[in-house]
């Protein structure tokens, strides 16, 4: 597949999961793929949006604290962005493992590819909402993307992991809490890497 076709497919899939999530999850469930293809064609490019947008916003507009504006050193900001990117990709991988591991107690199936499809595609709204970080005063609007991500995760859990409908909310809640712990660890490690520079 050519790069142009790949990017068109990525844009079409991102739009479909946001605008027609139920129908798109059914399509995703039926598609043959691999974990490697999911990461190469979807996770790696979209996961880069957050550190890129956040870093540009910080460098151009700075950060406000106590009425002061602080602009981080460029090298430190770039190292933090790179570390954030690598750790975020790792967190998506960890999320896929959690989704797979936690599904059976909630009536779901332990299917590796389906778990990684759910981890990859449910993050779409959060990744795309990262564009709000380009202008830090409206960066808080990215919360809407995070909330929609939770909705996508809920819908996808039933479609891909075939969780028992009555227990899907408990499953998703446990997955989210586990993922938040992973992300807090990832953010802390990224900040530590930047501080060591």
Image: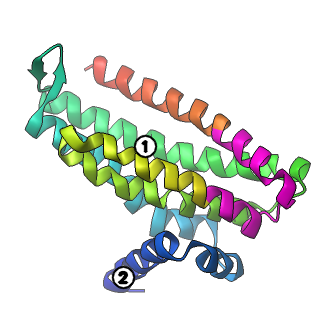
Q: Which residues are magenta?
A: 153-176
Seen in the picture, residue 189 relative to 81 is either above or below; the reply is above
**Dot 1 alpha-carbon crowd within 10 angstroms: few under 14, some 14 to 19, many 20 or more:** some
**Dot 2 alpha-carbon crowd within 10 angstroms: few under 14, some 14 to 19, many 20 or more:** few
Q: Looking at the rendering, which quadrant does residue 114 occupy?
A: bottom right
Q: Return the residue found at the far top.
A: 66
Is 175 part of what is drawn in magenta?
A: yes
For the point 56% across and 59% down, the residue is: 122
Q: Which quadrant of the rendered structure holds the N terminus?
A: bottom left
For this view, does 196 lie left or right of residue 134? right
For the point 67% across and 63% down, the residue is: 155
For this view, does 161 lie left or right of residue 5? right
In terms of secondary structure, what is the magenta stretch mainly?
Answer: helix
Which of 23 and 43 lies nearest the eye of the viewer? 23
For the point 86% across and 55% down, the residue is: 166
Mark 2 or mark 1: whose residue is earlier in sequence? 2
Colour basis? rainbow
Q: Looking at the rendering, which quadrant does residue 58 occupy?
A: top left
Is 45 part of what is drawn in magenta?
A: no
Seen in the picture, residue 87 relative to 117 is either above or below; the reply is above
As drawn, the label of residue 22 is none
Rendered location of residue 57, percent (x, y): 17, 41
Rendered location of residue 160, percent (x, y): 73, 67
Rendered location of residue 85, percent (x, y): 39, 44
As drawn, the label of residue 86 is 1
Q: Which residue is mark 2?
A: 8
């Amino acid at each position: 597949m050519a790069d142009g076709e790949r990017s068109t497919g990525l844009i079409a899939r991102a739009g479909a999961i946001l605008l027609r999530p139920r129908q798109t999850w059914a399509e995703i469930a039926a598609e043959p793929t691999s974990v490697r293809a999911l990461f190469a064609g979807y996770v790696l490019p979209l996961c880069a949006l957050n550190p890129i947008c956040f870093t540009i916003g910080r460098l151009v507009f700075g950060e406000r604290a106590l009425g002061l504006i602080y602009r981080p050193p460029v090298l430190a900001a770039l190292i933090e962005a790179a570390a954030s990117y690598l750790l975020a990709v790792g967190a998506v991988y960890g999320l896929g493992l959690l989704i797979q591991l936690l599904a059976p107690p909630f009536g779901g199936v332990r299917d590796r590819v389906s778990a990684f499809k759910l981890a990859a595609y449910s993050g779409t709204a959060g990744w795309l909402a990262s564009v709000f970080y380009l202008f830090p005063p409206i960066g808080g609007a990215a919360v809407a993307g995070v909330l929609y991500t939770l909705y996508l995760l809920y819908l996808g859990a039933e479609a891909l992991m075939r969780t028992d409908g009555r227990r899907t909310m408990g499953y998703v809640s446990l997955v989210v809490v586990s993922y938040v712990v992973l992300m807090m660890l990832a953010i802390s490690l990224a900040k530590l890497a930047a501080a060591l520079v």
